[in-house]
Image: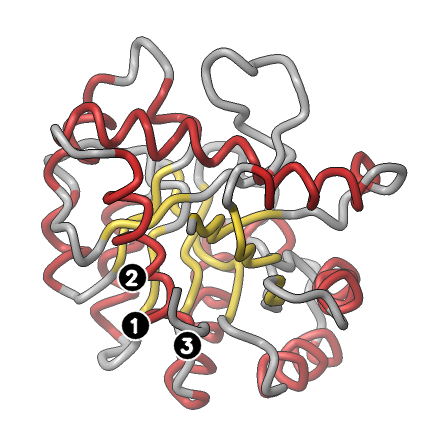
Amino acid sequence: MLTDTHAHVYWESFREDLADVLARARAADVQRIVVVGTDVETSRAAFATCAGVEGLYPTAGVHPHDAEGATEADRAEIERMCARAECVAVGETGLDYFKLFSPRESQRESFRWHLELARALGKPVLVHSRDAHEDTVELLRSVPGVRGVMHCYTMGRTELGPYLDLGFFISFSGVVTYPKNDENRRAAQAVPEDRILFETDCPYLAPQGQRGRRNEPAFVLAVVEAAARVRGMDTAALGARASENAARLFGLPRP
């Protein structure tokens, strides 16, 4: 069994063929998909997409791109969704200093709010971090007791230490398959076996060989294969271990 721990299968690009997308995922042995919200509207869409579908699990949160525009009413709605039993994580949240669609201070304040909510609910947090390593670590350390995952980890081995020390899981995406990303592959080689996860972040970041196409959960197999090669492991064994890790982090049924 494989688990795609971060997917956005409610996007418009999946509207016409979601049933086929999920069938292809199951054919590739991707039996569980965490469907991640990035604002109130998409968080509601994540819950609606998962409702009544075995193996799909929703989350709710506000992406750092949208931090500045989130209102108190939005936060109240995100909190209500996160408190629901079927919600397996808080987020996507975090910091993105690459595009700066929201000011840094708005992002930091929103990230801290999500971290405190995750701690209060006892649920993991999904952390986005781009060009913001130092501030991400600082904020994670400022809210002790939070557990979670560094989603779509694109950094190298050098930056891993603080996240592992904090008990966080590390999730790799199609980025680890790209020919020039040797540092990211070194990170995939170094993460302890009990902390590694895999994701697509679909419809974005299709793995090498599928680049230029819409990404989808079935393609997480290529991510696992790439990590297995650099770790010298059997793909099935690594995929199964990562699914055990996902079950432990998100409270999913054991594979």
Q: Residues within 10 Å of mark 1 (few under 14, many from 20)?
A: many
Mark 1 vs 3: CB contact within 8 A: no
Q: Residues within 10 Å of mark 3 (few under 14, many from 20)?
A: few
The quarter of the image holding the C terminus is bottom left
Q: Earlier in the sequence, mark 2 or mark 1?
A: 1
Query: How many numbered circles are shown?
Result: 3
Image coordinates of residue 231 in percent, x first then y, are: 14, 31
Image coordinates of residue 218 in percent, x first then y, are: 56, 36
Of residues 215 and 61, the one nearer the viewer is: 215
Estimate the spatial distance between the alpha carbons at disc 3 and disc 2, rounded to whole Å: 10 Å
Res 147 quadrant in image: bottom left
Is the residue 239 above or below the residue 5 in the image? above
Q: Amino acid at mark 3?
A: Gly
Image coordinates of residue 90 in percent, x first then y, are: 50, 71
Q: Earlier in the sequence, mark 3 or mark 2?
A: 2
Q: Earlier in the sequence, mark 1 or mark 3?
A: 1
> Would you say 37 lies left or right of 89 here?
right
Mark 3 vs 2: CB contact within 8 A: no
Q: Amino acid at mark 1?
A: Arg
What residue lies at 38% left-to-right and 44% top-to-bottom? 198
Which residue is labeled 3 in the image? 251
Estimate the spatial distance between the alpha carbons at disc 1 and disc 3, rounded to whole Å: 12 Å
What residue lies at 21% left-to-right and 56% top-to-bottom? 195
Mark in the foreground, 2 or 1: 2
Image coordinates of residue 154 in percent, x first then y, are: 33, 33
Estimate the spatial distance between the alpha carbons at disc 2 and disc 1, rounded to whole Å: 13 Å
Is the residue 72 above or below the residue 220 in the image? below
Which residue is labeled 1 in the image? 147
Q: Amino acid at mark 2?
A: Asn
